[in-house]
Image (cartoon, rainbow, N blue to C red):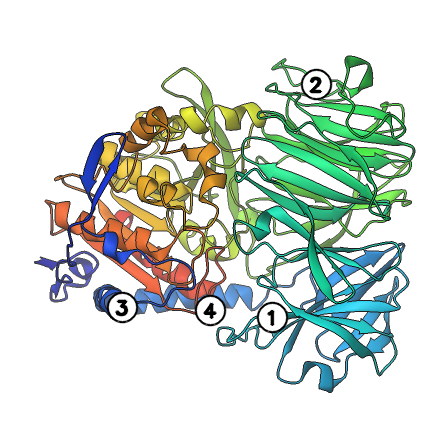
Amino acid sequence: MAVQGLTAYAQAPTIPTPAPALEIESWHTLHRYSWNDPYEWMRKLPDQPVSAQLQGVIDAENTYTEASFKPQAPLEAKILKEIQDRLATQTTLDNKNEVAPIRIGKRVYFYALDTQSIRMRRSTHSIEIARVPDSLIAGRTLVKFLPTSKLERMALLLSKVGDLAPGVQAPAPVSKPEVWIVEGMGRHPVVTDRFEIDDIDDLQWAWDASGKNLLYVDPENDTKNRQVFIRENKVSRVFFETEDEKTYVLLNMTRDEKYFRIEVTGFHLEYPVVYDRAFHRVFTGENKPGVFSQIESFNDDWVLKSNRGGRFYNVYRFSKTRGTEQALTDADLFLQGSEASDYAPDRNLDENTIGLDCFARFCAVERKTDGKPELVVVDSAGKKLDLLQFSEPFFYIQVGALDSYESTQFDLDYLSYLKPRSRYRYTLGEKGYKLVGESKIPAIRIENYRFEQKKFKVWDETEVPVTLVMHKDTKLTPNTPFFVQVYGTYATTFYIGYDVAFNIAHAASMLDRGVVYAFVHARGGGELGYHWYVDGNGANKYNTVKDFKSVLEGLVASKYTSPSKIAIGGFSAGGFAMGNAINDFPQLFKAALIQQGFLDMIGSQSDPEIPFVKLEWSIWGNPNDKNDFNRMWSMDPYQNLKRANYPAIFVRTSVDDNTVLVHEALKYVSKLRQKRMNTEVPTYLQILPAGMGAHDGRYVNYEIDAARNFTFLLNQIAPSKR
């Protein structure tokens, strides 16, 4: 069968689709229900080699996709040049020569790539305090260093190959990375210990008070992800472990650097376990499903953010002398939450408390008011000192990690749809905040773009917010092309600046052509707080899809656009909504872009060999539970494909994606091709080869991927604006 797709607009010859994928009978039985999965043979686990048979399917799909896009090469090249020209003018807040800056006391230390040296940063310049000899890193790349408080000892995290140099992509690692313990900070440090680790990028660490023993988390697999190790006398042993297979651990220090903080985290609970620097346990939070807590050290007290099993958070404060596992009481209340919906700006706290940072003289509490993050600064008595607000919707803010506990000021990183990352500084006693640095893209005139915040009443009369981003001259009519995206999972606010979601340096190529970006803040996400997440999670997971459908219907009913002008998009967990939209309401859109999408729900969630599957059961359901299984089956994108007409679909994934495995896309597209009735409409699948892509968007070149995505979308919903 031949498909025209993109080539139709260029009047190029049709291109044969790949031959049907091999089907091998593979029967599964669960809860007395049996089904055949003929593409089960495509299953590929992390670190498994790609079989010759599977490689043949990958090659055929990539060859077909490349041939299909070839007639549109001029458009793709034009878009790519537009993006590259913008980025050529970009300046960022981060110095790409500095690897992993680390604060110790009031000073900040970092490793400088160009000089292979450890440096200490002062207000106006930096000082070299140690040089890492070539003999230590010959044939290797230094990823980061982990200094102790007195800087007499450090750990170097090294990989045999890497991609630290800006714009340079190295081959995939050929052996495990290592941690080297180094004595002395002069020009001739001595390696006293070395050991292998699995995950060099996400290693978490802390030194004990003596600086001799290193605590670390090596979060590579289901088991190690639940363990904290201690390295002492050249031997690693388990220091802490959670037995709950639906959790993982995070290791960090409190801001005052007096305590190790182990956060046991899952999608069904979260609680802290705190040790002093001599390894004495000093506090344990409530370990109970439905209870989510985070802790901060605040002079002689603990400050704890907790929902205590409810739908809303409060902040509590109590003495460190109380004991390690004492239950909270109402008398411990420090900042009161509320279920009210008027979002009064003079309250200390509202229903959607999501962040907490404490310094010696004040605490900064992040909350959300009508979806907008803001910071409330309170003193030791809980009295409000200041309220820091911004005008744009659904942006991202983060209190600077490098600010010391004794500081009377802190930096605040801010990122929105139209504003690249900026840094503001708040100083105690001064109202408001001031800009101290920002990323800039001079080639983009931000004033040429605008955003609008809309709310649509959905299927159950709930108002779901939608953010529209567009060129200032774009008018909303039934002929306006829309790219509508949704995520709606993990209590996450829709990604901004994340290269597979929205990046103004990329998106300007679409906005300038009259395409409107619409971000649906569906339930299951965290845009409106914890309760918004609960209402789109677990047994309520399909609410995410129903919210998305209602918004698409609302956009059309409002005459902002029409189905033939709508493309939808989802990344990772957003693939769940994409797959269900394709199955349940394909008449509402013209095309779908799915990137690293979660599409094989039953297959993945019932496979114990896939990393972190049990951790995800609180989100999607446990297929071993009959009720969960029935619900999951009804909304599994792969299992519910049927003989039908489908819109144009472009699926992208990577062989190296260890979060959503490559076989999900391969199985989905193979079955979709077999079920599609309107075979003249295109289905594309692009699989990046090993070493060239991962789940978080770390590709060889983001811009190349964006140019191809935009080429597909423009040809489907705005062919006259290419």
**Numbered circle sitting on residue 177:** 1
Residue type beneath disc 1:
Pro
Q: Is residue 92 left or right of residue 434?
A: left
Answer with mark 4 or mark 1, whichever residue precedes in sequence. Answer: 1
Circle 4/circle 2 CB separation < 8 Å: no
Q: Is residue 503 above or below residue 454?
A: below
Q: Which residue is mark 3?
A: 55
Q: Which residue is mark 2?
A: 337
Q: Which residue is mark 4?
A: 700
- For mark 2, does the 10 Å Cα neighbourhood hold few (<14), some (14 to 19), or many (20 or more) residues? some
Answer with mark 4 or mark 3, whichever residue precedes in sequence. Answer: 3
Q: Is residue 224 above or below residue 526?
A: below
Q: CA distance from mark 2 to mark 3?
A: 55 Å
Front label number (3 vs 1): 1
**Residue at the spot 90% in from the left edge and 28% down from the top edge:** 321
Q: Is residue 84 left or right of residue 529?
A: left
Residue type beneath disc 4:
Val
- For mark 3, does the 10 Å Cα neighbourhood hold few (<14), some (14 to 19), or many (20 or more) residues? some
- SS category of the residue bearing label 2: loop
Answer with mark 4 or mark 2, whichever residue precedes in sequence. Answer: 2
Q: CA distance from mark 4 to mark 1?
A: 21 Å
